[in-house]
Amino acid sequence: MAQIINGKEVSASVKAAVAAETAQLREEKGLKVGLAVVIVGDNPASRVYVNNKKKACEEVGFQSFEYALDENTTEEQLRDLVDVLNRDSRVNGILVQLPLPKHINETAIINAISPEKDVDAFHPSNVGKIMIGEYSFLPCTPAGVMELIASTGVEIAGKSCVVIGRSNIVGKPMAMLLLHKSGTVTICHSKTQNLKEICLGADILVAAVGKPNFVTGDMVKEGAVVLDVGINRLENGKLCGDVEFESAEKKASYITPVPGGVGPMTISMLMKNTLTAAKQQAGLI
């Protein structure tokens, strides 16, 4: 039976380290750290995320600035707000909660955020830096997965790593981070042939496909480390991941549960990125 990777515990230790450093910088340098979160419209899931981010800011000692805009906010109005936040010295990180309403071009808004304040690491210049391995910020979810792998003590170098999913937010950066740690990486997607065989070769398997219980135990190599990025709600209201937990747990050496695995890491890594941004803007790194 696999050992459970407890995302809540790892997340709490990351936040504790951020809180300690934030307090020290405030005391020694007078530095205050601020995160601005922008939400457009009233998507219930987005509201939960925004509230969680505000709560995390309080826990680590950041100032939190929330901008809740009406569903009918124009793209131009949103860009104007981003411009204001780019120039606001109290704001070290800017996060525009996605998805945005259909009439707003998400790419244009992401590109309008100053790369120095882009704590989601979605701006093309930050994405490019991840590609060449000279990054300041990492996308929060893949960075969280890397922390969880590190918590197991499993060495990535030389291992066969399979990432299922090729999104810009998780799949692609996840593959690059594993590659930077000298993993041998395969990215699988909807056109991949022989998916089961490829997965069975994985020492480290990351599922980020957005399909409930997609990865079953017969796709998991004996002793593999399994990281489930998916979060799906079943018809009965229960949450589940992209991995069929019961069958995969029997084969894996380590596995993340859903909920309580990768999920808590995303926000703690956002806090870490925001602290890094504040230190950079203050000329401390």
Image (cartoon, grey):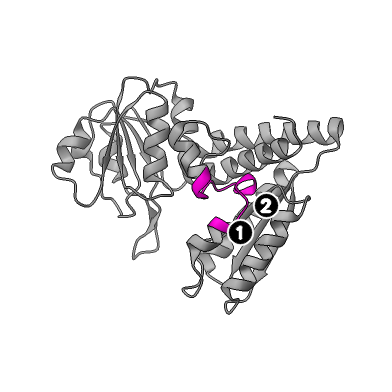
237 displayed left or right of 69: left
Q: In this view, does 93 lie to the left or right of 174?
A: right
Is 154 above or below relative to 244?
Answer: above
Under mark 1, the amino acid is: Val
Which of disc 2 and disc 1 is earlier in sequence? 1
Residue appearing at x 55%, y 62% in the figure: 109
Q: Is residue 133 visible?
A: yes
Q: In which quarter of the image is residue 86?
A: bottom right
> What label sits on residue 55 in the rendered view?
2
Q: Residue 50 carries which label?
A: 1
Count up the numbered dots.
2
> Where in the figure is residue 11, as x and y percent of width and height?
57, 38
Give how far across and how far down residue 131 sits, in percent.
43, 36
Give the amino acid at mark 2. Answer: Lys
Task: Give the extent of the magenta segment.
Answer: 111-125
Q: Is residue 117 magenta?
A: yes
The residue lying toward the viewer, choosing from 155 and 1, is 155
Q: Is mark 2 on a helix, strand or loop?
A: helix
Residue furthest bottom in the image: 72
Residue depicted at 56% across the width and 39% down the height = 137
**Disc sitting over residue 117 in the figure:** none
